[in-house]
Image (cartoon, helix red, strand yellow):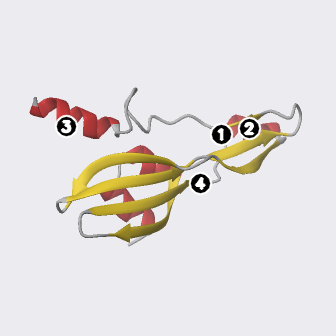
Amino acid sequence: MKQWQVLKTIFPEVIAENFEFVNYVESSDRLDYWLDERGYMSREDYKKGTVREHGFTEERVIQDFPIRGKAVYLHVRRRKWRDTEDGSIFTYNYELTEEGSRLTPEFVAFLKEED
């Protein structure tokens, strides 16, 4: 089984499709997963030919559904891109968290159902 197939069964689809599993640490009460954004640029930027990888953003920690009774934290680094034509630096946008929280949208929806 490929890594992305495992990730797709555990993490939100947007994470599994756009990020690579880098590391994890398991303790008695939590699971921490480190994920880096894959180096895929948009078709438009690829065709433009002036966009290059430019490192990563600072790590952002997101809480997701518990797994086997343990809290799950995703340590996510987004890829930065630089357009050599104008010098601008940017990232692609993904809906990784619910607005105003550090929780995945699916986890927030689940918690709202419990109310």
How many residues crowd mark 2 within 10 Å: few (<14), some (14–19), many (20+)? some
Q: Nearer the viewer, mark 2 or mark 3?
A: 3
- Badge 4, how many Cα within 10 Å: few under 14, some, many 20+? some
Q: Residue at x 39, y 27 (%)?
A: 100
Q: Is residue 75 left or right of residue 104?
A: right
Label 1 SS: loop
Q: Nearer the viewer, residue 6 or 35?
A: 35
Which image quarter: residue 3?
Answer: bottom left
Please give the residue where the numbered disc 1 appears in the rendered image: 42
Q: Which residue is mark 4?
A: 38
**Coordinates of residue 52 in the picture (x, y in percent):** 79, 47
Which image quarter is the N terminus in?
bottom left
Type of the residue with mark 4: Arg
Marks 4 and 1, Cα distance to the nearest angstrom?
A: 12 Å
Report the mark closest to the observer, 2 or 4: 4
Q: Nearer the viewer, residue 83 or 30?
A: 30
Q: Which residue is mark 3?
A: 110
Q: List the residue tagged with mark 2.
A: 45
Q: Is tag 3's residue or tag 1's residue first in the polypeptide sequence?
A: 1
User: Mark 2 and 1 residues: CB-CB less than 8 Å, in contact?
Assistant: yes
Query: What's the CA distance linking mark 2 and mark 4?
Result: 15 Å
- Cα distance in 3D space between marks 3 and 1: 31 Å
Position of 105 relative to 75 (above/below):
above
Q: Residue 28's spot in the image, x, y percent?
A: 24, 69
Please state the total of marks drawn on the protein image: 4
For this view, does 114 lie left or right of residue 109?
Answer: left
> Which residue lies at the image location 37% right of the left edge and 32% below the top edge?
101
Give how far apart the Cα atoms at labels 2 and 3 are.
36 Å
Residue depicted at x 63% and y 46%:
57
